Amino acid sequence: MLPGMARVGGVKQVMHQPLAVSAVDYHTAGEPFRIVCRGVPPLRGVTVLERRRNAAARLDHVRRLLANEPRGHADMYRCFVTEPDDEGGDLGVACFHNAGYSTACGHGTIALVTWALDSGVVPIAGPQTRVVVDAPSGRLRAVATVEGSRVVWVRFINVPSFVEATDVEVTLPKGTVSVDLAFGGAFYAVLDASAVGCAVVPATSPS
C-alpha cells in the first residue's frame, strides 16, 4: 500500500494531512476582515506583490478554505500577513476574497493595524502610533490613536490616486454605458447610476 493511504472496510482511501490554520476576525464599522495569524508557511518573494503571487500558487487551498462556506462568505475580506518590502515598513499584507486576490483593502488596513497593535506585532509607541503597511498596491502609512493600550481610531494615507481614462464605452446586456476608469489602490469603473436605471437615494436603500 502506498504511503498516505489506508484500508477502510477493504477499500483503499487517501489520508489527507490535517491543516490547522489560526485566524482572528476583526471588523471596521461592520465590514469583516479575517487575519491569518499562524498555520501557513511564509510567503516567498522580494516584494509583497511577489508574495501575493506566491500565495496564489502555493496557498490557494487555504484561501478557498477560509473564503467559502461554511468558514467564510462572499462579503468578507481576509489576508495573509507578510514581511514588509524593506526596513521602512512594519508589516506586509496580501489580501484575498472568495474570488481571488486583491491589491489592497481599505477597511482591512484599519483592521490589520488594530490587530498588529493589539497583538504586539507592532509595539504601541504613544497615543499617536505610526504603522507602515506594504500592500501590493504600494505603501500605506497609518496612524493609530491609542488610549492606554486600546486602539480607538485608525486613519491612513492611501497610495496616489489618478484617472486612467474617461468616457470609456462598455457594452452591457441592456446596452452601452460610458464609464470613467480611476485608480485608488485598485481600478474602479465609475458611472452615473441613472445610466443603469438606478438611483442612489435613501428611499432605494435596503430597510
Image (tube, rainbow, N blue to C red):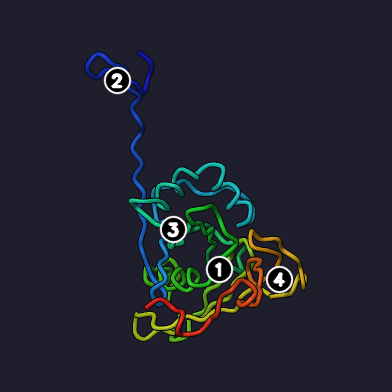
Q: Where is residue 192 in the image (x, y as percent from the top left)?
A: 65, 77
Question: Where's the N terminus, which quadrant?
Answer: top left
Q: Could you tell which of marks 4 and 3 lies nearer the N-terminus?
A: 3
Q: Is mark 4 in CB contact (under 8 Å) with mark 1?
A: no
Count every numbered label the image shows and give the total.
4
Q: Could you tell which of marks 1 and 2 lies nearer the N-terminus?
A: 2
Residue wearing tag 1 = 133
Front of the two marks 4 and 3 = 4
Q: Is mark 4 in CB contact (under 8 Å) with mark 3?
A: no
Q: Could you tell which of marks 2 and 4 lies nearer the N-terminus?
A: 2
29 or 79, which lies in front?
29
Q: Where is residue 26 in the image (x, y as percent from the top left)?
A: 37, 68
Q: Which residue lies furthest to the front in this view?
A: 174
Residue wearing tag 4 = 179
Q: Residue at x 57, y 65 (%)?
A: 104
Say which amino acid is labelled 4: Val
Front of the two marks 3 and 2 = 3
Instruction: Calculate the distance from the C-alpha at mark 2 to the C-alpha at mark 4.
Output: 57 Å
In the image, residue 62 sits, relative to residue 205, either above or below, namely: above
In the image, residue 69 sits, relative to residue 175, either above or below, namely: above
Say which amino acid is labelled 1: Val
Q: How crowded is mark 3: few (under 14 residues within 10 Å), some or many (20 or more)?
A: few
**Secondary element at image label 2:** strand
Q: Residues within 10 Å of mark 4 (few under 14, many from 20)?
A: some
Residue wearing tag 2 = 6
**Secondary element at image label 1:** strand
Q: Could you tell which of marks 3 and 2 lies nearer the N-terminus?
A: 2
Q: Which residue lies furthest to the left in this view?
A: 9
Instruction: Calculate the distance from the C-alpha at mark 4 to the C-alpha at mark 3.
Output: 25 Å
Residue wearing tag 3 = 74
**Secondary element at image label 4:** strand
